Image (cartoon, rainbow, N blue to C red):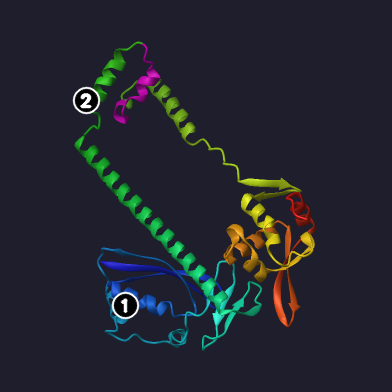
Amino acid sequence: MTFEISYQEITKTGKIVTKRKAFKTESAMDKFIDKLTEKDSFYQILGTRKEIEVATAQEDIDTAIECGLIEAETTENDKEENTMTQSTFTTKLGNTFSTNDKGNYFYMTDANGKKYRIKKSEYEQAKREYELECKMDADQWEAEADAERKAREDKIAADAKATEDAVNGKTRKTEEEIAKLDDAAEDPDVTLQEFCEMLSEDEKATIEPAEAELLNNVRKEKKAKKTARKPRRPKDIAYEGHGVALTAKQVDFINHLPDTCFWEMGVDSVIWCDVLVDDIGGQFAEKPMTVGAMISTLCEKHLGIRGKEKREGRKVTNFALTELGKEVAKELGLE
């Protein structure tokens, strides 16, 4: 029995790469996970699974190294990675959170490379959401791996059954089906097309050429119906105007912008993003990642714009509606 882990790391160039590693024992895999999560380059664990298979000599060596029975040759990169900690992680929005060596100062680096000092509570909240995202990704990976493995097993079983039936000349027709065919052959109301649809592949091969052509047309008609494109479901559009379409969630976010204390000038207000995260209510309360995603979506639709400003010696990111965004907001009832 072998144990396998799939995980992701961040390279020195900033790319996220997916890796897999197999172990002979579960304890060896647990020790590897403990060491892996201490690396600064560690991104997330996609999932783990166990399989019954014969271990190779290299896997035995890897397992012995992980269990501490033998020592592996240590490279300079290994020494450097062993000094890293799990204090740094990057979210899907591109924000990187980190601490200093003592762990008493906390920082956030945004997608533009700007680094800010943040509160411990903000760092811990981001880390909890990051760990939840990792768990969801791992669950999805395990579900997909199980489905893929089951599909392979079902195909192997089906192929084996088909081969066995072909060799032994077996038929899957029951007595009831045979009786139904006999009745259909004597019934004048049953057309040739309907009768052909009731035949097996071996029985179809024995019919006359004219009948075969008719049967082929029936098969093509069935295939055309099966491959017909299903109509796409319409999107959940709650607002459409000025060349912009918004979902119900995006409309709700715009309607909650007045929740912040920075909504002093109505649609002309300039809002600090971190204050908006603290003040906003509804389905966006205490969900900084969701608020960030909504802001990014409005900017992509040219309804909003991000900016930088400095107040009281502090650099902050702000958000304001564009002229198009103001028109849309007014139509939604904001002033």
Task: From the image, tell me which residue sits under label 2.
Answer: 175
> Disc 1 designates what residue?
62
- The magenta region covers 189-203
> Which of the 4 image quadrants contains residue 263?
bottom right
Between 167 and 70, the one lying in front of the other is: 70
Q: Residues within 10 Å of mark 1 (few under 14, many from 20)?
A: some
* Residue at left offset 23%, top offset 38%: 165
25 part of magenta stretch:
no
Q: At x 25% / y 32%, what residue is drawn?
A: 172
334 lies left or right of 12:
right
Residue at 47%, 66% in the rendered image: 132
What amino acid is found at the position of numbered circle 2 in the picture? Glu
Q: Judge by depth and name the residue closer to the eye, 277 or 37.
A: 277
The residue type indicated by label 1 comes to: Asp
Q: Residues within 10 Å of mark 2 (few under 14, many from 20)?
A: few
Q: How far, Cα to Cα, is label 1 from label 2?
A: 59 Å
Measured from the top left, where is residue 20 in percent x and y? 40, 69
Residue 269 position (above or below residue 175): below
Is residue 172 found left or right of 246 in the rendered image?
Answer: left
Residue 92's place in the image compared with 103, above or below, is above
Q: Quadrant of residue 270?
A: bottom right
Compared to residue 270, the image places residue 161 above or below, namely: above
Q: Position of residue 236 (x, y in %)?
A: 61, 46
